[in-house]
Image (cartoon, helix red, strand yellow):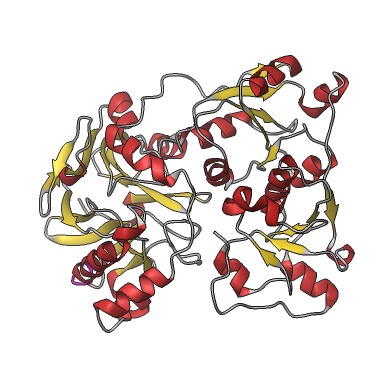
Amino acid sequence: MGFTDEHLIPLVDEGLGNSAYLVDLGDGSALAVDASRDLRALRAAAERRGLTLRFAADTHLHADFLSGAVQLGHDDGATVLASAAGRRAFPHVALADADEADLGGLTLRALATPGHTDEHLSFLLLDGVRELGVFTGGSLIVDSAARTDLLGADRAEELARAQYRSLRRLATLPDEAAVWPTHGAGSFCSAPAGRERTSTIGAQKQANPLLAEADEDAFVARLLGGLGSYPAYFDRLTEVNRRGPAVLTVAAVLPALTVDEIEGVRVEGGHVVDVRPVADFAAGHVPGAISIPLRAQFATWLGWLLPDTSPLVFVTGADQDVTEIVWQAWKIGYERLAGHLAGGMPAWTAAGGDQQHIELLSAERVGGRPVLDVRQDAEHAAGHIPAAAHIELGDLAEHADDVPRDAVVACGHGERAMTAASLLQRAGHTDLAVLDGGPDDWAATHGRALAHDTERTTRR
């Protein structure tokens, strides 16, 4: 069909650090690869090109988002292509190693590439005999490979050895073949920092440090040595994706609730999530509310810190899109969304509701107060305020009693620090402050170098 780069459209989810792909098959139809349940960008791209979504392929049972393949099958009649070894409990074409799917001019060949998961497939896209590129999912990713501990720490080494063999297999493809991974920068599935999300086999043979390792043992040591923590909800979604996410049949609407209705949800064990910017939350918020600012990373922290079994109510700013809250929650399986506070905080205060506050400090005002760094282990090790205590945000609820009184909570910019401070405040800390900025701002203000760690120091 004369496939060119213009026939492939990457669709990047900056928050989860992933890419889905829309492939124009040249006959008015399209293939979607690793599409999430939030299909807005995919559908918009298909509509712009006048494409019908005919196929949906998943490289593996995703842990970080709910697959959109079932929805595409329901809404668009798309044929779902996935690994036979995944034992998915919904209609799909079950593929094993070397099986091929005719896409109507192009061909998709399944390559068994276990490691990130047991049933992982990569999909080689062919135009006749020409090997155009490979959708590598969580096997070979740009300058790395995806983590192998999501099925349990006891299987991490076994799967890392499988990952070694999978990467070597992919490296036998032609140097000019494109590499189209799912996981990229920002993914907790172990993608390194960097702007590049796609590559070629030849470029990865030159640049990927895992492919440069001399033997399997060295590969395993490097891969396992780079693993950090990951969101709690990852442990739930693989099985949901195997069964098949529920088909969405309602609009992404978040009902407006009165102050009394909000209180009713709280009495029933619900949580209040405040999605406003850091400064707004600091100035005044509903007592006990958790601050998770509405930004690209919203879903990650919602899924890491709050259960999916309790009703959630949201406090928003006047210019925030409540539809975005719904879609970010839905794509990680959070569906008990009770509503949002009608009128926001002005309505709360007008009804006589109490407020809590958290001090927001500039770097020059930190003084000699103890500092708590809540960033990820690798971030802390790369440079932190000297003598700062370190507890990752995801672990903080279990270690609230270990946080020093009068602490200034810090992260990279302030969003995670405010989330941490809200958790601590709910646990009984009343004398907290949040650093407005991050360690670099502190260093610039005080004319001092940041401290660096050579060993992992995260408390888990």
What residue is shown at x 31% (from left), y 76% (from top)? 219
In this rendering, does residue 205 appear at all?
no
Residue 252 image offset from top left, x and y in percent = 52, 24
Residue 400 falls left or right of residue 69: right
What residue is shown at x 85% (from left), y 28% (from top)? 354
Residue 46 falls left or right of residue 1: right
In this rendering, does residue 155 appear at all?
yes
Majority secondary structure of magenta residues = loop
Question: Is 171 colored magenta in this rendering?
Answer: yes
The quarter of the picture where residue 410 lies is: bottom right
Residue 198 image offset from top left, x and y in percent = 38, 62
Residue 207 image offset from top left, x and y in percent = 37, 78
The quarter of the picture where residue 238 lies is: top left
What residue is shown at x 37% (from left), y 61% (from top)? 147
How many marks can you see? 0
Front one among 15 and 2: 15
Front one among 159 and 102: 159
Q: Magenta residues? A: 170-174
Front one among 364 and 182: 364
